Amino acid sequence: MTEETKTSAATSRSTSQGRSLQLGVVGLGQCGGNFAEAFSVVGYPAIALNISRADLRGLNRIPESHKLVIGEDGAYGAGGSLSIGGEALRTSQAKIEETTVALLDDVEVLVAVGALGGGTGGNLAELVNILAAQDFPVIALGILPSASEGHRTKTNALWALNELVDSAAEAILLIDNDKLFAAHGASSAMRYMQDCNHAFVKAFEALNRLPSNEALRPIRTFDPNDLRQVLRFGGVTVFGSAIIDGDITSESLVSALSDALNKNDLLAGGFESHDAVMLASVITANEASLYDVQASVFDDYLREVRRMTVGAAHRTGLFVGEGPATLHVVVAGLPLPSRAVEMLGEASSEMKAFGDKKLAARSKLKKLDLTALGIVATPFATSDAPATAVADTRKHAEGVAAAGSFDEP
Ligand SMILES: Nc1nc2c(ncn2[C@@H]2O[C@H](COP(=O)(O)OP(=O)(O)OP(=O)(O)O)[C@@H](O)[C@H]2O)c(=O)[nH]1
Ligand SMILES: [Mg+2]
């Protein structure tokens, strides 16, 4: 199918389902698979790729035909090694292409998702390029590690981010696990990750349904193509909603815009508004509050946004609905978030601390002085079998050295 036919077939189907974009999802690694499952639960077709068969077994809502073991044997994961994860992708490239084309050919856009800190998921850019080479437009959804995770996970994530910048991804969305984890700390240990992942998918689904939401009456229309254009515009993309505090004024709208961008509880933040290249603002408010607002408020808001973003393209919508007045925004064309720069700082100092610790640990690992016990140097070397006893002692020593080594985890 050409992209044009694909888009038009997908557009008519998704409009009938109330969705702007008909998405298919390809999850890579454990976290990627968990997200694929969360998307699958709300009805998006999804495939999960993993080196470990056991990880795939845990995904109950994805049909077996949509689970793919990549790499040689399916026994072990990548154990945090990007090269093992990358090798597995390359070994199974033909199988991935075949399965994706067979199962997801009629979707408009693929979301390739994975944890950038994982040995498997950290190869997300390579997966994006494999899928894009099959003529799929691809949005990359990368999960950033939280600040409390180790330097290896962060180093993987930084490398993976750089690869994504150079990849064929149409847009890059970056989930911040610190924010997700903070919001769901009260969930049970059993449900924690599912709750985190579901929170993102629910927000994404609400955005995807916003233009066609039948509970909303348009005053200024924001149609599915407006959303499609912003979401597929390029660069790092952020979306979010913020309740408008107090009266609807141009100031409260600007403040809601800044909250949705930088106090976002799902996606990595830290952007300058002047870096935005394209954005969408959709206001939903009840009828009574809209009767109280002068129309000029919206024009003032648009003028202010134009000034703040130094002329970014702006799609807008105004809808009457229930609930508190809310601003929904999508901002595209952004550079990497400041969280990535923070993570680089964390990883560098944690790596140094780890290196110092490793050296100190080696110098602290000393033999005990056993002279007071009167033990002689080679206690097991008996006179009738000296050669074997010495060899056994060395083997034992090597075992101890290996068990006591301080290689990076
Ligand atoms: N939000 C979220 N983060 C997850 C989930 N599962 C793992 N993570 C995060 O993902 C990173 C680890 O990546 P994994 O997906 O476990 O690793 P992998 O891609 O399977 O790679 P290997 O285990 O090395 O083969 C860490 O930053 C975890 O905090 C999940 O379901 N949701
Ligand atoms: Mg894994």
Image (spheres, rainbow, N blue to C red):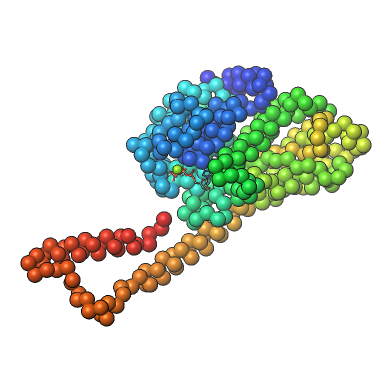
Q: Which residue is drawn at the image coordinates 38% and 59% (left, top)?
A: 407
* Residue 87 spot, x, y in % from top left: 38, 41
Q: Is residue 378 visible?
A: yes
**What residue is shown at x 38% (from left), y 44% (from top)?**
84
- Residue 347 on image: x %, y %: 52, 58
The C terminus is located in which quarter? Answer: bottom left
The answer to whether residue 333 of the structure is visible from this angle is no
Q: Is residue 295 left or right of residue 397?
A: right
Q: Residue furthest left?
A: 384
Name the side, left or right, on which 316 lies relative to 399: right
The location of residue 191, given as percent across then percent down, is 57, 41
Quadrant of the image occupied by residue 143? top right
Q: Position of residue 331 (x, y in %)?
A: 69, 41
Is 233 placed left or right of 134 in the picture? right
> Residue visible at 68% across and 50% down?
271
Circle count: 0
Q: Quadrant of residue 211?
A: top right
Q: Nearer the viewer, residue 290 or 53?
A: 53
